[in-house]
Amino acid sequence: MFRRGFKTSSEETALKIRRKLSLAPHAPVNPAAIAQLLAIPIVAPRELAELPEDVCSRLGQDHSEAWSAITVSDGNRHLIVVNSTHAPTRINSSLGHEIAHVILGHEPSMMFITPQSGMTLRTYNKDQEDEANWLAGCILLPRPALLYVRQHGLSDDQVCREYGVSSAMFRFRINCTGVDLQVRRMRNSYSK
């Protein structure tokens, strides 16, 4: 359950971002442009000179499906490390999610290595993850964009291509916003 006003605030944040990027409220947005606006570099593991080659290989091959992106922060500056082996739609979603964490001022998760097994573990804050997921969806597909695509008859495939999102993300946003019902009611009221 989100705190009161969070969903409305998320929609407003998505529109503020578009205004800062000189985009229409319904226009697609590139998460990399948002990161640039916020001065957040985006890198792949191979671009981190300090990361040993064997770690890069494991992240990009052996464990590629185990992670999408992570934000590293020193408290003032942020860096997003993205899994560049993923599909562009997943990368966009992951970048939106990580950018949302930064915008929301979330505390980074703690990572630690277990002494017995040497495995890397991290803490997980469900509320923060849910908020970042919600805001990322609003950033990628704000309500005005959903209304626009429905009113202009774009197919689901066209929307996914144009907005750089997966069909699962598009369906989620359509279902949770009730846009289809709103458009249907608008059409019914115009036909009377």
Image (cartoon, helix red, strand yellow):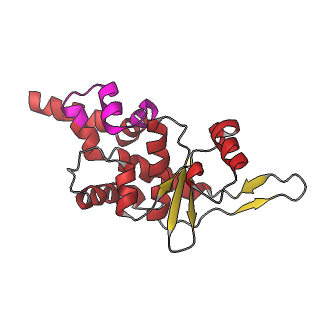
- The magenta region covers 149-171
Residue at horizontal 26 percent and vertical 61 percent from the top: 20
The residue closer to the viewer here, 188 or 35, is 35
Residue 191's quadrant in the figure?
top left
Q: Is residue 147 left or right of residue 134?
A: left
Q: Quadrant of the C terminus?
A: top left
The residue closer to the viewer here, 55 or 108, is 55
Residue 189's quadrant in the figure?
top left
Counting from the top left corner in percent of width and height, residue 144 is at 25, 45
The residue closer to the viewer here, 11 or 3, is 11
Residue at horizontal 69 percent and vertical 40 percent from the top: 63
Counting from the top left corner in percent of width and height, residue 88 is at 45, 37
Q: Is residue 56 left or right of residue 143?
A: right
Residue 100 position (above or below residue 144): below
Residue at horizontal 28 percent and vertical 25 percent from the top: 155
Q: Is residue 95 left or right of residue 115?
A: left
Give the prevailing secondary structure in the magenta stretch. helix
Counting from the top left corner in percent of width and height, residue 74 is at 57, 72
User: Does the magenta segment cover residue 165?
Assistant: yes
Q: Is residue 46 left or right of residue 30?
A: right
Counting from the top left corner in percent of width and height, residue 141 is at 34, 44
Residue 2 in sight in this render:
no
Residue at horizontal 34 percent and vertical 54 percent from the top: 33
